[in-house]
Amino acid sequence: MTTLPLAGIRILDFTRVLAGPLCTMLLADLGADVIKIEHPKRGDDTRQWGPPWAGEGADAQSAYFLSVNRNKRSLTLNLKTEDGRALAHELARQSHVVIENFKIGQMAQFGLDYENLQQTNLRLVYCSITGFGQTGPYSQRPGYDYVVQAMSGLMSITGPSDGEPHKVGVAISDVIAGLYAANAVQAAL
């Protein structure tokens, strides 16, 4: 059996929706042990997205969720509790990489930002996927694919030439962000 290139690498995944989960899915496909952290009561929001559904009735699962979270393990943690944060810190201490795509400052509120985590794991690779970067005039704003497509000008060149701007059919900004994040993590390792 062939060993995958990221075998032996543990990644702690605090991502949701598309850019982050796509990034960690690609790294899991390359052999990384990805532990996805989910909300303790509802799990990842995308578990409820559908149709389409995989399976039927009570066994039905979101095809969207399954498609970007393959090859991952999952753990629910309440990051608003001391016990949840302590377990997250311990998992980060044992990991090579932490990836998150929360709004700027959210991980710091949990004490799970790079500055806090690197104190117990000096070699930690920390990837924060944001819409507008860590600094600058828009850094505190949440970023969504629609917004990035509009602000980048992409929507202005789609649709009828004499009509309103149109969103590209796929969430291309999120896909590209996820691909670049996966490449950046591999380069950092």
Image (cartoon, grey):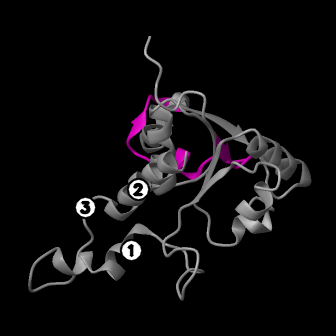
Mark number for residue 169? 3
Mark found first going from the N terminus, 2 or 3: 3
Q: Quadrant of the N terminus?
A: top left
Q: Is residue 88 above or below residue 161?
A: above
Q: Which residue is mark 1?
A: 148
Q: Which residue is mark 2?
A: 180
Tag 2 secondary structure:
helix
Residue 148 on the magenta span? no
- Under mark 3, the amino acid is Gly
Picture residue at 76% right of the left edge, 58% below the top? 112
Does residue 18 show up? no
Q: Could you tell me how far apart the alpha carbons at marks 2 and 1 are, in whole angstroms?
A: 15 Å
Q: In the image as oriented, which residue stretches furthest toward the top?
A: 1
Q: Position of residue 125 (x, y in %)?
A: 63, 51
The stretch in magenta equals: 36-57
Mark number for residue 67? none
Q: Position of residue 16 (x, y in %)?
A: 56, 54
